[in-house]
Image (cartoon, grey):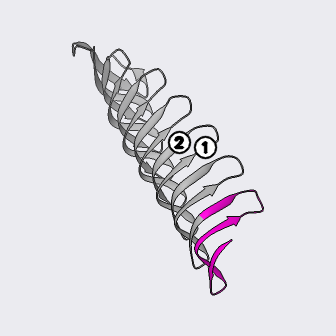
Amino acid sequence: VGDWKDDMQHGKGIYFFHTGDRYEGSYVQGERTGEGIYYHASGNKYVGSFKDGKQEGHGTFTWASGAVYEGNWKDNQRDGYGTYKWNVGVSYEGEWKDNKFNGQGTLIQTDGTKYKGGFVNGMEEGSGIQEDKNGNRYEGFFKQGKKHGPFVETDKNGKVIRKGTYKMGRLEN
């Protein structure tokens, strides 16, 4: 249903897929391009930009579970800057690449633990600061999601609790 030009969808339209999915939005020469809404039969929904039939540019994807991602997309994947909020209270805000945390970001866990620093392939990597809900801080390095390298831990008042070195999550001294 919608506008057609040269036997192709062109302009505004609605398309019902045999899978139960539905798209409402702009078409250019038969491809979803521009702003639109894609409703998945599963209950998931994407609202935002499309290019050549794919999620591209800024958009919001809401999963049926209640999780939400708002940010940049490239070739149907989270890519660039965005915020993801799980339905259990965990959130991540920062850089994405290939649908994973990559670059600088902030991850907040359900227990209030907050990590701010580098990520590679969805895991903490490089320098970062981890702070618990009581204000105790770990400043140091991470590798493949584990504490790795020299660190300093301080309490909420900034008093040094301990210093040392971790190796792949194990305290060395």
Report the residue at 56% width, 39% height from top: 67
Q: What residue lies at 62% left-to-right and 69% top-to-bottom?
A: 13
For label 1, the residue is: 63
Local SS, label 2: strand
Q: Magenta residues? A: 1-24
Is mark 1 in CB contact (under 8 Å) with mark 2?
Answer: yes
138 within the magenta span = no
In reply to whether residue 21 is colored magenta, the answer given is yes
Say above or below: 127 vs 47: above
Residue 96 sits above or below residue 143 on the image: below
Q: Position of residue 72 (x, y in %)?
A: 44, 54
Residue 150: name its quadrant.
top left
The label number, if any, that marks residue 42 in the structure image: none
In this rendering, the answer to whether 106 lies above or below 162 is below
Extreme residue in the bottom direction: 6
Residues 104 and 162: in front is 104
Q: For the residues marked 1 and 2, what is the alpha-carbon distance in whole angstroms?
A: 6 Å
First reached walking from the N terminus: tag 1 or tag 2: 1
Q: Which mark is residue 68?
A: 2
Q: Is residue 144 visible?
A: no
Within-10-Å neighbours for mark 1: few <14, some 14–19, many 20+: some
Position of residue 162 measured from the top left corner of the image (x, y, whole percent): 28, 14
Image location of residue 56, percent across then percent down: 49, 62
Question: Residue at 37% across / 40% down in the picture?
Answer: 105
Amino acid type at image mark 1: Trp
- Total numbered labels placed on residues in the image: 2
Left or right of 140, for residue 2: right
Q: 142 or 22: nearer the eye?
A: 22
